[in-house]
Image: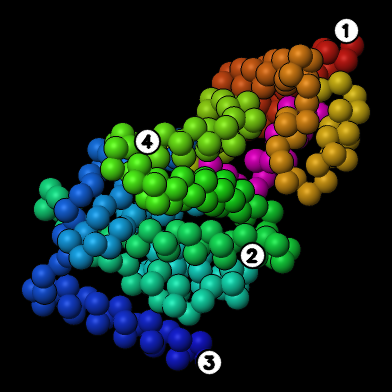
Amino acid sequence: MPDDDKKSKSDVARMGAQARWGSGATLPRAIFGSTENPLKIGNIELPCYVLDDERRVLTASGVQFGMAMAQGGSMRKGLSRLELFVSGKIISPFISNELRERVENPILFRTPANGKAYGYEADVLVELCEAVLAARQAGKLQPQQLQIAQQCEILMRGFARVGIVALVDEATGYERVRKRGELHKILEAYIAKELMPWSKRFPDSFYEEMFRLHGWEYDPKSVARPGVVGKFTNKYVYEALPEGILDELKAKNPENKKRHHQFLTEDVGHPHLERQITATTTLMRASEDWTGFKRLYEAARSRTRSA
């Protein structure tokens, strides 16, 4: 199908939805849920609601954040980041026409507080994760998209574990006596276990200072980072470890499927890593710009080599 035809269909769908919303049509209303009680998965918060027509929805921003996408407004007029993502040349072949249409037409609903919000049925997040993992399996993802795939994999594993528990509870009748939030606790504990090996080895301050020196906007809630951050981390942290360590880490982790520090030993490797992170962060904090930091870093390295 020509691109113009695809665009015209999308525009027609969007205008149709806008016409319905603007014509005074009654919006679906959330009868359960609130922003104060989101679905929490590790450090991820997904605002969720049940609508009066029994659809389970996640807010559009929650879906975006759940997939570790950069936050913020659209990059092209009229398109959200999710729409741009599913229409991109890398992911698009793995997105069904039905899923693309659902992403392009989010649900406008009223919250219990009578505000308006955009959302997607919860299974949209699952289908998006499946598409990303299929693209990774086919070797099509760019390096900066691998962390999105990692996030999707963690989410899918967590959802699968909770799903089987919920099915057993329903079959046995235990769901009637199950404590409120019990499934949530199971999911959160599992996700925390998955994230533990890497999420906090590099504190927020390390990235916050790096972003400041480059003039980048820093969002502590987002794990999306410019691709060059990995190169800086190798150069100013891992290369400062004892000679040969970085080469060995690259040999053990050639495709960067895990974080390098997951291969370091707890008793020796991690303490050394933490000291280097602290030293690098301190130098960044003492610098006015990236050039100044590099100058301080090289001076400190020279003193270390001559000691």
List x then y, in percent, for residue 235: 76, 33
Q: Tell which circle, 4 or 2, labels the residue nearer the N-terminal end.
A: 2
On the rendered structure, is 180 left or right of 280? left
Mainly helix, strand or loop, the magenta region? helix
Q: Nearer the viewer, residue 229 or 20?
A: 20
Q: Residues within 10 Å of mark 1 (few under 14, many from 20)?
A: few
**Mark 3, residue position:** 1
Confirm or deny contact between disc 4 and disc 2 (CB under 8 A): no
**Mark 1–mark 3 contact, CB under 8 Å?**
no
Whether residue 94 sits left or right of residue 58 in the image: it is right
Number of labelled discs? 4
Q: Which mark is residue 134?
A: 2
For the C terminus, the quadrant is: top right
The span from disc 4 to disc 1 (Cα, nearest Å) is 56 Å
Q: Nearer the viewer, residue 174 or 90?
A: 174
Please name the amino acid that badge 3 sits on.
Met
Q: Which residues are magenta?
A: 223-240
Q: Earlier in the sequence, mark 3 or mark 2?
A: 3
- Helix or strand or loop: what does disc 2 sit on? helix
Mark 1 residue type? Ala
What's the distance in space between the residues labelled 1 and 3, CA to CA? 67 Å
Residue beneath disc 4: 182
Residue drawn where x is 40% and y is 40% of the image: 183
First reached walking from the N terminus: tag 1 or tag 3? 3
Q: Is residue 141 above or below residue 104?
A: above
